Image: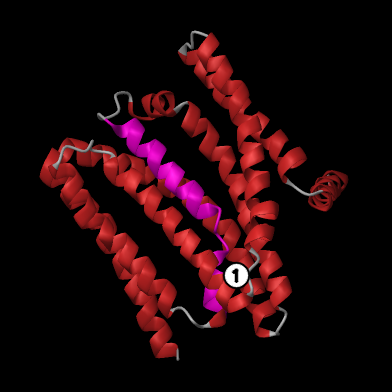
C-alpha cells in the first residue's frame, strides 16, 4: 500500500513539473524568451502567495487524517469545509490588492514589467484562488488511502494543457492563454475532487458551497466593489496607488473578520489578542 501510494503521488508530482516546465518550453517556442520572462515573474508572485497559504493548511492535515482514521468522518469533513473557507479568506488579503493594482505593484517591484506580465499574474492568481477554495480536498482524499483516481485525473488534466496550448498558439491565441487554461483545468480538477469526496466520504456539496464558497465570494465582492469604483472615478498617482493598496488590505481584513468568519472564530481571535495584550 505504501509503495502504491508513493507511485501515485510521484505520478501527480511528475505531471505538475512536466506541465509547468512544458508550458515554459511551448511559450518560448512561440514567443521567445521575453514572454517566458513574464511567465516566470508571474509564477514567482503566485508562489509567494501559495507558500503562505500552504503554511496555514499544513497544520490541519494531521487533524483531518486523525479524524478519518478514528472513524469520525463528519469531523474530518467539517475540518475540510472550514480550512477551505479560512484559507480562501486569507488568500483574499493578497489576491484583491494584486487583482486591483497588478500593474502598479509590478511597476514598484520591477520598474518596467515585461509585456503581458500583468495578464499572466492576474490569471495565475485566479487559478490559485480556485485551487485554495478546495485546499482541504487533497489531504482528505489522502486520508482515505485511495488516491489512484485523483492522481490519474490530476495528471491527465495538467498534461493535457500542453497539446491544448500548442494548438491554441498555432491558431493565434494570446500568449497568456496558458494561464487561462490553467484556471479552467484547476476548476475541472476541484469539481472532480468534489465528486470523488462525495463517493469516498459522503462529502456534502451543498454544505460546502453554503459554508465555504458563498462566504468567500460574498466577502470578495464586498471588498472588491468599493475599490473598483474608486479606481474608475479617481486619477491614480503613485502615492495614491500606495494609499489605496494599503486601504484595500485593511478593508479586506475588516470584511474577512466581520463577514467571512463565524462568530465563534471571531471570539477566539479577540480572546487571543486580549491574552497577548494582557501579557504585555
In percent of width and height, residue 41 lies at: 32, 40
Q: Which corner quadrant of the image does residue 82 belong to? A: bottom right
Q: Is residue 67 above or below residue 91?
A: below
Furthest-bottom residue in this view: 1
For residue 232: magenta? no
- Between 26 and 272, the one lying in front of the other is 26
Q: Is residue 229 visible?
A: yes
| Residue 264 image point, x, y percent | 83, 52
Q: Considering the image in quadrants, where does the C terminus appear?
A: top right
Q: Which residue is mark 1?
A: 61
**What is the image's colouring?**
secondary structure
Disc 1 element: helix
Q: Which residues are drawn in magenta? A: 116-143
Q: Is residue 180 above or below residue 16?
A: above
- Overall secondary structure of the magenta stretch? helix
- Could you say where residue 244 lies in the image, as x and y percent from the top left? 57, 21
What is the x, y in percent for residue 155? 33, 68
Query: Is residue 183 shown above or below 246?
Result: below
Local packing at callout 1 (Cα closer than 10 Å; few below 14, some 14-19, many 20+) is many
How many numbered circles does the render carry? 1
The stretch drawn in magenta includes residue 135: yes
The residue at the point 64 percent across, 34 percent down is 252
Amino acid at each position: 500500500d505504501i509503495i502504491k501510494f508513493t507511485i501515485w503521488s510521484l505520478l501527480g508530482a511528475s505531471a505538475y513539473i512536466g506541465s509547468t516546465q512544458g508550458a515554459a518550453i511551448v511559450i518560448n517556442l512561440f514567443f521567445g524568451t521575453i514572454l517566458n520572462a513574464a511567465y516566470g515573474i508571474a509564477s514567482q508572485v503566485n508562489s509567494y502567495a501559495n507558500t503562505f497559504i500552504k503554511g496555514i493548511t499544513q497544520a490541519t492535515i494531521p487533524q483531518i487524517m486523525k479524524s478519518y482514521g478514528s472513524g469520525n468522518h463528519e469531523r474530518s469533513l467539517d475540518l475540510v469545509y472550514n480550512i477551505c473557507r479560512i484559507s480562501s479568506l486569507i488568500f483574499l488579503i493578497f489576491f484583491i490588492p494584486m487583482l486591483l493594482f497588478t500593474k502598479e505593484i509590478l511597476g514598484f517591484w520591477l520598474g518596467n514589467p515585461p509585456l503581458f506580465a500583468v495578464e499572466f499574474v492576474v490569471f495565475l492568481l485566479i487559478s490559485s484562488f480556485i485551487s485554495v477554495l478546495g485546499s482541504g480536498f487533497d489531504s482528505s482524499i489522502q486520508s482515505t488511502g485511495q488516491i489512484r483516481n485523483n492522481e490519474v485525473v490530476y495528471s491527465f488534466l495538467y498534461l493535457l494543457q500542453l497539446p491544448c496550448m500548442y494548438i491554441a498558439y498555432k491558431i493565434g491565441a494570446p500568449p497568456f492563454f496558458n494561464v487561462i487554461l490553467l484556471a479552467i483545468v484547476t476548476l475541472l480538477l476541484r469539481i472532480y475532487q468534489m465528486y470523488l469526496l462525495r463517493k469516498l466520504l459522503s462529502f456534502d456539496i451543498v454544505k460546502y458551497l453554503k459554508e465555504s464558497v458563498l462566504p468567500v465570494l460574498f466577502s470578495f465582492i464586498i471588498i472588491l466593489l468599493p475599490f473598483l469604483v474608486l479606481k474608475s472615478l479617481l486619477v491614480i498617482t503613485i502615492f495614491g496607488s500606495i494609499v489605496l493598496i494599503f486601504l484595500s488590505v485593511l478593508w479586506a481584513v475588516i470584511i474577512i473578520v466581520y463577514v467571512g468568519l463565524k462568530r465563534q472564530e471571531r471570539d477566539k481571535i479577540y480572546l487571543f489578542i486580549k491574552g497577548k495584550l494582557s501579557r504585555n
